[in-house]
Image (cartoon, grey):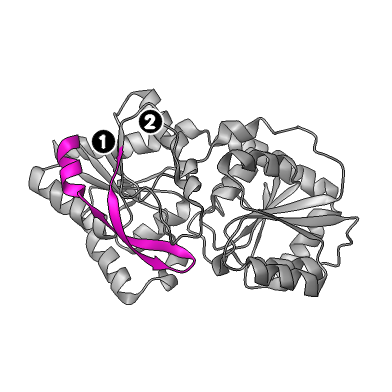
């Protein structure tokens, strides 16, 4: 199987490693580029560990989009596929790499499976041309892997049969975080953690306003914002104005995020646009109570209302404020949601996601034979 992710990122590595270790399919990962310089992440974020599967990294022309994944046109993709000689190709989303992989696959009778994080919430963010392209490409794919149940709903709206879709949740280093379950943290006020790039979609400004409106004293709770980006100065100034007890910890390398989760009581993700939201899977794996945007693909899969999360409308500061107040001042609710995160993580082991990829690939190759 040739897999065509845009760039190496740490949260995908566990999936590729697991696929290789299980041995049902032999993954060869062809990254379209070694980094995305316009994606508000430091270069070291894109450094993937060498694993048990072959890989290569292409070069790509990229058009920056502030706060969003750049548009990418990889060089040498057809030659890389020719070297790999795959029995199946798995490509990301519906952009130029997928068009080229589809053309290459059709000429050789090789099935193409599309991996997608998109949900119905994604469609308003797309141009009419993009939505038309998705509608044209989807019927031509031989199968799909989606990162959430919301992704299934979107494909069904595009006319794709449910039988052609497998759900493999967005991967993360779950094992590293499960070890935090039950581990006591350092003393101090209750900590609400938000990890993410400081860009408009992450909605940190509204989170600060909601925290201020909740009326929580500094002795009760503090907000910890872990990440960097173009809005950092504005967010620091806003936090001063609204008098929120907040710590901006700056950029953290992937290896440093474990400590951030270890110190948290609640993990918050209030994005206005979030195809999945890997911090929700990581927060659940760490056994934390979650505050999750209803617009995140993770909502309903790894952040479930009343089981391990409070789901909120990210456009409503009052709704977020009320949820924060409950999470801070109702310790029994917090304990119940944390226990729900532990149970939910046990129900969704990483092996289940790898099995979903295997089913999609093996079905497509069988049907193409």
Residue closest to the far left? 107
Q: Quadrant of residue 187?
A: top right
Q: Is residue 51 visible?
A: yes
Question: In screen coordinates, is 136 left or right of 236?
Answer: left
Q: Is residue 277 above or below residue 321?
A: above
Instruction: Verify whether residue 59 appears in magenta.
Output: yes
Q: Is residue 312 above or below residue 55?
A: below
Residue 26: x %, y % from top left = 29, 29
Residue ID for mark 1: 1
Instruction: Identify the residue shown where x is 58% and y is 31%.
Output: 175
Q: Quadrant of residue 253?
A: top right
Q: Is residue 160 visible?
A: no
Q: Is residue 167 above or below residue 139?
A: above
Residue 121: x %, y % from top left = 47, 66
Question: In screen coordinates, is 182 left or right of 281?
Answer: right
* Residue sitting nearer the eye, 191 or 243: 243
Residue 130: x %, y % from top left = 31, 69
Check the picture and name the quadrant holding the C terminus.
top left
Instruction: Identify the residue shown where x is 80% and y is 34%.
Output: 184
* Magenta highlight range: 56-85
Between disc 2 and disc 1, whose residue precedes? 1
Instruction: Identify the residue shown where x is 43% and y is 42%.
Output: 168
Residue ID for mark 2: 19
């Amino acid at each position: 199987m040739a897999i065509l992710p845009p760039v190496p990122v740490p949260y995908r590595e566990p999936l590729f490693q697991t696929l290789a270790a299980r041995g049902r399919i032999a993954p060869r990962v062809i990254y379209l580029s070694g980094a995305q310089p316009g994606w508000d992440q430091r270069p070291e974020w894109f450094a993937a560990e060498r694993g048990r599967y072959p890989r290569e990294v292409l070069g790509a022309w990229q058009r920056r989009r502030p706060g969003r994944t750049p548009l990418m046109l990889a060089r040498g993709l057809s030659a890389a596929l020719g070297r790999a000689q795959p029995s199946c190709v798995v490509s990301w989303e519906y952009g130029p790499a997928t068009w080229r992989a589809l053309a290459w696959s059709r000429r050789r009778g090789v099935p193409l499976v599309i991996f997608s994080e998109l949900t119905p919430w994604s469609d308003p963010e797309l141009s009419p041309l993009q939505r038309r392209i998705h509608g044209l490409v989807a019927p031509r794919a031989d199968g799909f892997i989606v990162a959430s149940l919301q992704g299934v709903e979107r494909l069904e709206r595009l006319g794709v049969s449910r039988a052609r879709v497998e759900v493999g949740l967005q991967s993360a280093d779950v094992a590293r975080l499960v070890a935090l379950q039950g581990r006591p943290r350092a003393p101090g006020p209750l900590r609400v953690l938000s990890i993410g790039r400081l860009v408009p979609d992450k909605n940190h400004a509204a989170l600060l306003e909601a925290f201020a409106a909740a009326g929580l004293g500094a002795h009760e709770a503090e907000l910890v914002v872990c990440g960097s980006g173009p809005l950092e100065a504005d967010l620091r100034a806003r936090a001063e104005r609204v008098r929120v007890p907040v710590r901006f910890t700056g950029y953290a390398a992937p290896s440093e995020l474990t400590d951030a989760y270890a110190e948290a009581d609640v993990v918050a993700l209030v994005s206005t646009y979030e195809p999945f939201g890997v911090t929700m899977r990581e927060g659940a794996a760490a056994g934390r109570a979650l505050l999750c945007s209803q617009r995140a693909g993770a909502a309903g899969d790894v952040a479930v209302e009343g089981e391990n999360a409070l789901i909120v409308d990210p456009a409503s500061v009052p709704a977020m404020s009320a949820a924060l107040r409950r999470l801070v001042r109702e310790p029994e609710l917090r304990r119940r949601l944390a226990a729900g995160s532990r149970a939910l993580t046990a129900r969704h082991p990483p092996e289940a996601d790898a099995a979903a990829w295997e089913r999609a690939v093996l079905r497509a190759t069988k049907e193409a034979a």
